[in-house]
């Protein structure tokens, strides 16, 4: 089993969460989904209620926080990695982090066999001599085990983020999530963290960031056909 984790601010959540959740349920069955919402809005709370009404059998957990940063975008982009240790501890299951504005187009479950014995999975591109080193690491999809080395990697991600993030916005922090992952990857060898390149696993091409949304009615009909409406599962929520 594995938890699908995503995060967004309230406005982004309202815009993308329905499609994201629908694609996760369609492709990953009854895998728990956890969504961390930063600065939730009245609309985002309504959207969450609507999602749970549409999919009463789904295991959808949530957490939330309120921040007051002048330049919040870098924080929003990194929030799923900052929230991941708490999610790992709460579920005691591996976690796959995914951008909320991506569409999951195949099941993540077969990748668990590929990742057995690994603490972290990252999409690492071949390095180009002319590219910035941190661009090798994609932040779109990542895997973390619920063991000490997985927590250690995420601790390094958080350390880099909080050392470099400027909430006032005087320093441009965009792409800080990729930089933080690249920094933690550099620390991994000396910390004996076992990292696997996801491009050689079943998580390769897990999502499509350009895929147009399927018609809502058709997608709902297809998902409901897979799950009897009375198959209600428990959820986890924490602040």
Image (spheres, helix red, strand yellow):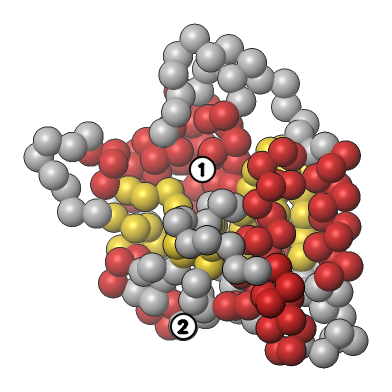
Name the mark nearer the viewer: 2 or 1.
2
Query: Is 62 in front, or is 188?
Result: 62
Quadrant placement of the N terminus: bottom right
Give the class, few, some or many, for how many residues have Cα within 10 Å of label 1's Cα (few <14, many ≥20). some
- Whether residue 180 is visible to the viewer of this picture, yes or no, is no
Quadrant of the image occupied by residue 134: top left
Quadrant of the image occupied by residue 124: bottom left
Q: Is residue 233 above or below residue 162?
A: below
Residue, disc 2: 110
Q: Is residue 183 above or below residue 164?
A: below
Helix, strand or loop at disc 2?
loop
Q: Are marks 2 and 1 in contact (CB under 8 Å)?
A: no
Total labels: the figure holds 2
| 29 left or right, relative to 101 | right
Give the class, few, some or many, for how many residues have Cα within 10 Å of label 2's Cα (few <14, many ≥20). few
Q: Tag 1 or tag 2, which sits nearer the N-term?
A: 2
Q: Is residue 70 above or below residue 13?
A: above
As drawn, the label of residue 117 is none
- Residue 220 in the image: state x and y as whole percent: 73, 75
- Residue 37 in the image: state x and y as whole percent: 73, 44
Task: Single out the residue that lies furthest toward the top.
Answer: 170
- Whether residue 42 is visible to the viewer of this picture, yes or no, is yes
Q: Is residue 128 above or below residue 56?
A: above
Task: Single out the residue that lies furthest toward the left.
Answer: 129
- Residue 58 in the image: state x and y as whole percent: 78, 74
Query: Is 221 in front, or is 185?
Result: 221
As drawn, the label of residue 155 is 1
Query: Is 51 in front, or is 143?
Result: 51
């Amino acid at each position: 089993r594995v938890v699908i984790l995503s995060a967004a601010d309230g406005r982004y959540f309202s815009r993308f969460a329905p499609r994201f959740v629908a694609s996760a349920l369609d492709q990953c069955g009854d895998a728990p989904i956890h969504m961390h919402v930063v600065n939730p809005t009245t609309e985002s709370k309504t959207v969450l209620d609507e999602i749970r009404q549409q999919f009463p059998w789904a295991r959808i957990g949530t957490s939330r926080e309120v921040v007051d940063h002048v330049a919040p975008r870098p924080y929003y982009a990194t929030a799923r990695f900052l929230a991941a240790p708490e999610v790992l501890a709460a579920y005691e299951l591996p976690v796959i982090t995914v951008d909320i504005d991506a569409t999951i187009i195949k099941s993540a479950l077969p990748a668990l066999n590929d990742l057995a014995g690994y603490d972290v999975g990252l999409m690492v591109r071949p390095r180009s001599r002319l590219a910035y080193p941190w661009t090798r690491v994609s932040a779109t999809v990542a895997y973390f085990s619920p063991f000490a080395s997985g927590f250690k990697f995420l601790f390094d991600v958080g350390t880099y983020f909080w050392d470099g993030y400027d909430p006032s916005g005087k320093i441009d922090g965009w792409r800080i999530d990729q930089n933080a992952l690249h920094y933690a990857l550099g620390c991994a060898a000396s910390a004996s963290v076992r990292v696997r390149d996801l491009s050689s696993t079943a998580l390769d091409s897990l999502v499509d960031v350009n895929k147009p949304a399927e018609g809502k009615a058709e997608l709902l009909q297809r998902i409901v056909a897979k799950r009897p409406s009375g198959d209600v599962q428990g959820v986890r929520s924490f602040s």
